[in-house]
């Protein structure tokens, strides 16, 4: 069974906090790294060009262009990671979901893609997904 992989999993796994984070954040970082290890070991996941772009922008601003490009190269080389394309119609459909479930645009895109691919589990630390019936959020 494939799961959707939200951008925040990568961000928790890769970004180092500037000051000592609370224990809750340390736990999320630990779990994010475990999830990434499973993906690197071949677990099949889906993300979108939107989520990938979000990760790349944040990595570039925090760690620099070269790290961001290395990350992109790694993501593109992973045969077990599907990167779903997103167009205008996807955003139109996602906007309906956003308003219905009180979620962000990127979360709406994730839900739209998940539904179109028959995926009902998402790796994410974003509790807004708990508002969406039929979606199970996985944090470990």
Image (spheres, helix red, strand yellow):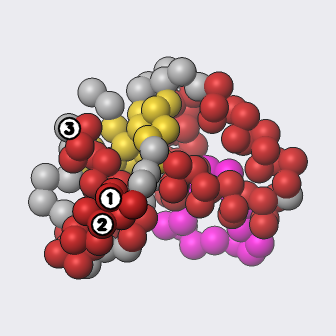
Q: CA distance from mark 3 to mark 2?
A: 19 Å
Q: Are marks 1 and 2 in contact (CB under 8 Å)?
A: yes
Labelled disc at residue 118: 3
In screen coordinates, is 25 left or right of 134? right
Regarding mark 1 in the picture, which secondary structure is present there?
helix
Rendering coords of residue 85 (x, y %): 45, 44
Q: Nearer the viewer, residue 10 or 29?
A: 10
Q: Which residue is mark 1?
A: 89
Q: Residue at x 85, y 58 (%)?
A: 64
Q: Specify whether residue 10 is in view.
A: yes
In screen coordinates, is 89 left or right of 68? left
Residue span colored magenta: 11-26
Q: Residues within 10 Å of mark 2 (few under 14, many from 20)?
A: some
Regarding mark 3 in the picture, which secondary structure is present there?
loop
Q: Quadrant of the C terminus?
A: top left
- Residue 15 lies within the magenta run: yes
């Amino acid at each position: 069974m494939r799961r959707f992989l939200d951008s925040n999993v990568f961000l928790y796994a890769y970004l180092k906090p500037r000051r000592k984070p609370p224990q809750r954040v340390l736990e999320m970082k630990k779990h994010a790294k475990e999830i990434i290890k499973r993906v690197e070991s071949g677990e099949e996941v889906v993300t979108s060009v939107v989520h990938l772009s979000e990760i790349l922008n944040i990595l570039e601003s925090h760690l620099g262009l070269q790290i961001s490009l290395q990350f992109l190269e790694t993501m593109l080389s992973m045969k077990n990671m599907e990167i779903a394309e997103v167009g205008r119609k996807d955003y139109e459909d996602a906007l309906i979901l956003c308003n219905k479930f009180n979620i962000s645009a990127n979360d709406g895109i994730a839900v739209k893609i998940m539904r179109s691919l028959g995926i009902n589990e998402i790796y994410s630390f974003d509790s807004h997904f708990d508002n969406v019936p039929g979606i199970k959020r996985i944090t470990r």
